[in-house]
Amino acid sequence: MELSRLSTDALASFAVFADHLNFTRAAEELHISQPALHVKVQKLAETLGRALYTRHGRRLALTPTGVEVARFARDLDARVAAFLAGVHGTAPARVPALAAGEGAYLYLLGDVVRPGIRLINGDRARTLAAVRTGRADLGVSVLDVMPTDIEAVPLATYPQVLVMPDDHPLAERPDLALTDLAGASLVAPPPTGPHRIALERALRSAGVPWSLAVEAEGWPLTLHFVSLGIGLAIVNGCVTPPPGLVTREIIDLPAVPYHALHLPSRADDPLVTGLLSEIRTALGNDNAL
């Protein structure tokens, strides 16, 4: 393959496609037709001689080559912008990008969220993908398995806690064990999520019978259902309960570790170090590792 055959337009288009993993939404952002975008991506794949994405039913996923191409495309775009800024004697307009999930934004990163930062919202898998492809300069997520291709910097750990109405009998105790939850009706995440899987495993291992009150996606909806008296819930300790609810630590559940994520090659990048410094300052020392 000759580098001269690589289309910078196709690379830029593929970077947008990699953000959405959806041809319709990416084409709308690029203001081109969906077939035109499909042709650009297909020709880029043919030029490289590698598949850039795979299809699993209706879901698309980047291949390892696709991840590398998306990262290269964004790096090239940043270099071109810096070069043009140098030619014109202006400062490059580099806006830091942060990826995290709903819970992290609401209960961990509140003081960091401000104008001037591009925010990307997604679950753990999407946060990792945003960092791998260069879409995000820094990601924040709970990790139970350390990725081998991403630098994971410990930020803070929180206990897992039971959230309940403040007049619930268990609220009278300073802390709880899993056996205290015997017979409880719980508000729990969907069954395929990592939190639900770990929770079911722990309850089963402790021989604790429980029932499902309702499935809820995200801490805010979970807290809402608990406030309505539908059930109790186990959440991360950084979650702030609304008035009328209290939390108690469950001492035999493992602590939840939050990490900042970035590409190893960008450890000294000012966008990465700046965001990381802001996050550490916002967290303070109460739960810092």
Image: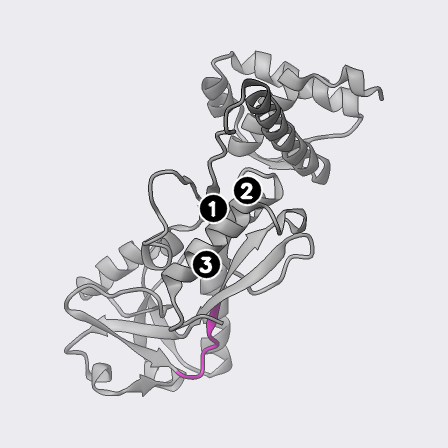
Dot 2 corresponds to which residue? 130
In the displayed structure image, the side of residue 269 where residue 164 appears, left or right: left
Whether residues under marks 2 and 1 lie with C-beta atoms below 8 angstroms apart, the answer is yes
Does the magenta-highlighted stretch encompass residue 116? no
Looking at marks 3 and 1 on the same chain, the residue that comes earlier in the sequence is marked by 1
Query: Circle 3 is placed at which residue position?
Result: 191
Q: Quick check: 108 above or below 9? A: below
Q: Earlier in the sequence, mark 2 or mark 3?
A: 2
The residue lying toward the viewer, choosing from 270 and 151, is 270
What amino acid is found at the position of numbered circle 1 in the picture? Ala
Q: Main secondary structure of the magenta part?
A: loop
Q: Residue at x 49, y 22 (%)?
A: 24
* Position of 46 relative to 141 (above/below): above
Position of the N terminus by quadrant? top right
* x and y, in percent, of residue 223 in the image: 26, 61
Residue of label 1: 99
Residue 192 in sight in this render: no
Crowdedness near tag 1: few (<14), some (14–19) or many (≥20) residues, C-alpha within 10 Å:
many
- The residue located at (54%, 48%) in the rendering is 272
Instruction: State the scheme by which the image is colored.
Output: one colour
* Between discs 2 and 1, the one toward the N terminus: 1
Boundaries of the magenta span: 251-257
Disc 3 residue type?
Pro
Residue 238 tag number: none
Is disc 1 placed on a helix, strand or loop? strand
